Structures are given as structure tokens and as C-alpha cells.
Image (cartoon, helix red, strand yellow):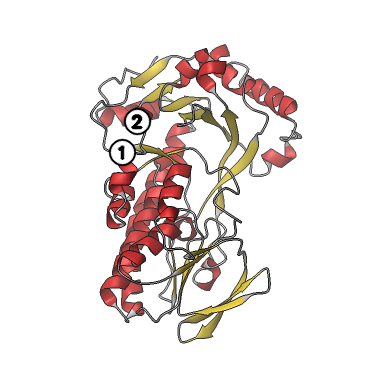
Amino acid sequence: MKQLSIAIIGGGLGGPVLAGVLQRHNIASTIYELEASIDSRPQGGMLDLHEESGQRALREMGLHEAFMKLVQPEGEAMRVLDKTGTAHIDQPADAGGGGRPEIDRRALRELLVSSLDPGTIVWDHKIAGVTARGGGRHELTFTSGKRVSVDLLVGADGAWSKVRPLLSAAKPAYCGVSFLELHLTDLARRHPASAALVGAGMLFALSDDKGLLGHRHGDGSAGIYVALRVPEDWTVSCGVDWTDARAARAALLDIFQDWSPALQDLIRHCDDTIVARRIHALPTGHSWPRVPGVTLLGDAAHLMSPFAGEGANLAMLDATELGLALAAHGADVEAALAEYEAALFPRSEEAARQSAAGLETCIAPDAPRGLVAFFQGHGLSDAQAPAE
């Protein structure tokens, strides 16, 4: 097994977990990452890591203790509001920890990457194409012109994976919802009223087929996703230049004109960088026939909307199970891949169903009624009855 060349395409979360699990079993691998460094771009907001998936991965890598020193217990708090600002759920963080500790995505990625042997990640390598060479081998071509042949290829390269076409003709489809990503820097000092509105953790402000989905970050800022049920081309065809912050804020405030002034302030006071994102998903139940020498993990395998909160956790679990299967089966790579995929497909299908249902629950005409009912059914002690 040590003699096999293993290429992992993508150095987000799943790629480093796979490399780390393999490293713990004395199996070398190489991650090819298109970013020039870990500091090339913002890493996103907070993640809650589940015991059975994200935290399991960290335990397998020997990083759980270090992870627990980085978590933010207050991040498990949650508020659910309607457009008037009425709180239907106001759940503080559990003083003893709720079992899904929150960590800044950047801190998590840095923890994973720093645990890898030097040279495991090859930065600034963007895939231009992949060619099957027979016998399970594949040749990678990078935009620089460099070529590499490998015995095992793992696509951990996200929604628009360059590896996926080797296995499946499926392509991500628009989910009917688009996000406008906002950011509010130094929230508590600059906008204390908005800080109190968002709370210490997650915010769901939902009504009328739209929402403001927020989360406090470890650096004192907050990320807000404006969620709108709109046609696929709306972010382009609506006529708004999203790089013009003043025009973008005005357009969004018009869309939310009947929402409470306090909620509107999350838009009114946001930073100047506003990013439009269309939400896509692969078909629920996406799978592929066994193809020698190649497989997928994370979004490359089962892209779904973020409304089940499973994306990062599933990627880390996929990577863990693949790494353990490869370690257990030694030179029989195909047996390892078959075992991994047999568990991967039903697991990801169930998560995709939950994600699709979550989207319909949150971005709905009568929201937040469905979300409140869901959380009440899961025993949130501070849940209040939905307003009539």
C-alpha cells in the first residue's frame, strides 16, 4: 500500500482529513489544491461538528483534544424570529455543551492542515483535466502543464468537481433559492442592538419565502445570508450590481421593506462586500458504478443545500471512512473503495433528503412555523408556540 501513489484533489476539509487518517496509518498521499495558500481567501463562518461525523474524524486524526481548545461554546445558542422580530425560539447555549460544538471554519482548516506532514499539500495546482489510463490509473493535467500519473484518485474538489465526470454524468441543479452573503465587522462595538438581535450563535429570521440567516463568528463579526426564493438567473437579471454596495443594500432593503427596522439594520449596516450565491444540489440518491482507481467524497459526491447543516460533517466522515477502509484492505484498493461506497450512498441520500426538506421548511410562505415545530419536536426547552 505504501508504494501506491494516491492523489487527493481538493484541500478544503475532506481532503486534509483523508490525508491525515492515511498518515496515521503510515500511508502517504498528496493533496493538490488550487489555492495558492491557506490564506488565499476567507474561509467562511462557523461550523457545528457532530459527534458521529466531524468529531469522529478528529478523534481518528488524534486532534480532538486540540479541537476542543478552539471551540466556542456560546456558538450553540439559537434564535428563531419572524419578520416582525418576534422571537419564537430563544435558546441559549447549553452550559455543559450541547454535543455539537462550534468552531470557526478557518481555525478548523488550519488545525487539519497543520497536522499533515510537510509537502502533503501541493498548493497552487489547478486541475485542467483527468484521463483514465487503464488498470485503475489516471493521469492528472494541471493548468501549468504539469502531468502526474496516480494509482488512486480521490475527488474532494467540491460542487463543480473535475473528477466527478469519470464516475457520473450528474450535474448540480439549482435548488430554487439564492443567497446574498453579507458580513458585519466588529458587530458588538459598532452595532450593539444588532449584536443583541443576532445573539451569541445562530439566527433564523424567516417569513414570506425569504430569510436572514445569521451566525456570530469567533472574531466578533457576524455573517448574514439573505435567502430568497427566486429564479436561477435572478442575481444577474434583476439589474442589481452586487459590487455596488450602496445599490445592493437599497435593493435588498426594498425586498425586505415590510420587515422590522431592527432586522433591516442587518442589511443597512453590512460591510461593502456582498456576494451573490446560487444554491445547487446533486440529485438525491446520487451514486455511480464502481470504477477502478477513483472515487469521490464531500460535495463532489453529494452536494446538497446547507439546510441540514451536514455538508462539512459528511465530508469529514466520508474522508475518515475512506481512509480507514484503505488502511484495512491494504493492497486491495478496489475492495476498500467498494466498502466505502456501499456505506456512502445510503448515508448521503438520507442527508440529501433532510437538506431538501429543510430548505422547504425554512424558505416557505408560512415560515418560521415549520422550523419552530421541528425544533419543538426535538425538545428545545425554550421554544415558544408559533405566533398566530
Of pointers 2 and 1, the one earlier in the residue sequence: 2
Give the number of the disc on residue 76.
Answer: 2
Mark 2 Cα-neighbour bin, 10 Å: few <14, some 14–19, many ≥20: many
Residue 361, image x, y percentages = 42, 34
Image location (x, y in percent) of residue 209: 53, 30
Residue at 33% across, 56% down: 347
The quarter of the rendered structure image containing the C terminus is top left
Disc 1 target residue: 100
Q: Nearer the viewer, residue 36 or 207?
A: 36
Q: Compared with residue 75, is residue 145 higher up or lower down, i.e. above or below?
A: below
Q: Viewed as shown, does residue 39 lie left or right of 50?
A: right
The reply to whether residue 19 is visible in this rendering is yes
Nearest to the observer: residue 150 or residue 309 = 150
Q: Amino acid at mark 2?
A: Glu
Estimate the spatial distance between the alpha carbons at disc 2 and disc 1, rounded to whole Å.
7 Å
Check whether the beta carbons of the residues at disc 2 and disc 1 lie within 8 A of each other: yes
Mark 2, secondary structure of its residue: helix
